[in-house]
């Protein structure tokens, strides 16, 4: 093709890859040769020439093996794929159980199996974090790990969201406020619980009515049962995920507690289930799809040798029936 265009092989390569330092005449000659020969670039060969694989990994520490049934991760994957849409990069999904499958993870992380990796859902001293750090691959964390502070991450303002949820319940005049937190070995759960404690401390209310669960509906139902046994007179509960909140609502119904009259409930996530519960769920909305998109965007920048800044995405309160706005605000 370079011979037909009358240019050097390096000039032809730069023109095909839309690189700089190619004259308009040479670029035009190469474009004519491409059309005449019907040339289609070999993506694999290009990647090898650049010493890149042409793929990135989304690695999720999957503890309960229910990832594909979780709409949260469906939105994450949608955001990641949207960010990769205009690239030639393939997305590889790697589910990592903390107690098995380590050899498969190591094989995936060893170059040249991937150009970079996005990591999510780490818990405690997760072996996945250590394996990623040893790989030397460009790495972006979706949500901070419990230990350490990586150079590149995209997270949600979990502490702020937990604080706003509790402040809303305080504004409703609730005084015996409990919380169902996520697993204590995750940064996301710790941050939301810290925000809850911040708000109740300012209001001079007890913030020790806490039960932990595993972000599932069943876990939320069981945690709500434990809270009612500990404090039958509780009048509000902030729940660290919508799935757990749906379970909590179910338990409250079984105990004859009216929501929101007897117990106000606030969730976290703004997943579709919040529209389906009875009553509909007041919640903290986090930009889940944007979390996936920005995580991939930051990784692309790192792979290209840039040094992007970490991101903290905002949350906001979405008021529905389970914890309606104070009367004064509703009237205004």
Image (cartoon, grey):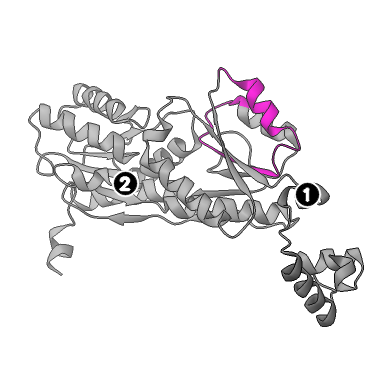
Q: Position of residue 108 (x, y in %)?
A: 67, 31
- 97 w.r.t. 115: above or below: above
Residues rendered magenta in the picture: 99-127
The residue mark sitting in front, 1 or 2, is 1
Q: Position of residue 71 (x, y in %)?
A: 36, 41
Image quarter (top left, top right, bottom left or bottom right) of the N terminus: bottom right
Quadrant in the rendering for residue 268: top left
Q: How many marks?
A: 2
Looking at the picture, tell me which residue is in the foreground, 183 or 21: 21
User: What residue is pinned by disc 2?
Assistant: 271
Of 327 and 318, nearer the camera is 318
Q: Secondary structure at mark 2?
A: loop
Would residue 206 be visible to someone looking at this image?
no
Q: Residue at x 64, y 57 (%)?
A: 309
Q: Magenta stretch: residue 111 in it?
A: yes
Instruction: Between residue 78 and residue 47, name the one nearer to us.
Output: 47
In the depicted structure, whether residue 327 falls above or below residue 136: below
Q: Quadrant of residue 58?
A: top right
Question: Residue at image x 36%, y 34%?
Answer: 69
- Assign a secondary structure to mark 1: helix
Above or below, comparing residue 286 to residue 108 in the picture: below
Contact? badges 1 and 2 (CB < 8 Å): no
Closer to the chain start, of discs 1 and 2, is 1
In the image, 44 versus 84, the foreground residue is: 44
The residue that disc 1 covers is 45
Q: Is residue 260 left or right of residue 25?
A: left
């Amino acid at each position: 093709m370079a011979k037909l265009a009358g240019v050097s092989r390096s000039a032809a390569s730069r023109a095909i890859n839309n690189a700089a330092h190619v004259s308009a005449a040479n670029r035009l000659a190469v474009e004519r040769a491409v059309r005449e020969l019907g040339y289609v670039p070999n993506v694999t060969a290009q990647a090898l020439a650049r010493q890149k694989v042409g793929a990135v990994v989304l690695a999720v520490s999957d503890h309960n093996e229910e990832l594909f049934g979780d709409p949260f991760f469906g939105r994450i994957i949608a955001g990641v794929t949207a960010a990769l849409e205009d690239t030639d990069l393939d997305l590889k999904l790697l589910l990592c159980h903390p107690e098995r499958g380590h050899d498969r993870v190591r094989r995936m992380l060893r170059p040249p199996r991937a150009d970079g990796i996005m990591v999510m859902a780490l818990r405690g001293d997760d072996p996945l974090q250590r394996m990623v750090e040893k790989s030397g691959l460009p790495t972006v964390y979706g949500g901070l790990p419990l230990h350490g502070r990586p150079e590149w991450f995209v997270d949600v303002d979990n502490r702020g969201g937990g604080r706003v949820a509790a402040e809303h319940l305080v504004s409703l005049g609730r005084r015996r406020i409990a919380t169902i937190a996520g697993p204590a070995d995750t940064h996301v759960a710790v941050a939301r619980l810290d925000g809850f404690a911040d708000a109740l401390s300012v209001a001079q209310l007890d913030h020790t009515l806490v039960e932990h669960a595993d972000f599932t509906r069943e876990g939320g139902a069981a945690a709500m049962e434990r809270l009612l046994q500990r404090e039958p007179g509780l009048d509000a509960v902030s729940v660290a995920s919508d799935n757990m909140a749906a379970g909590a609502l179910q338990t409250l119904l079984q105990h004859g507690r009216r929501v929101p009259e007897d117990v106000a409930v606030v969730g976290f996530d703004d997943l579709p289930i919040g529209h389906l519960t009875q009553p509909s769920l007041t919640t903290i909305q986090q930009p889940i799809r944007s979390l996936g998109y920005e995580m991939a965007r930051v990784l692309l920048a790192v792979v290209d040798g840039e040094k992007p800044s970490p991101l903290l995405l905002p949350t906001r309160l979405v008021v529905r029936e389970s914890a309606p706005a104070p009367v004064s605000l509703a009237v205004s």
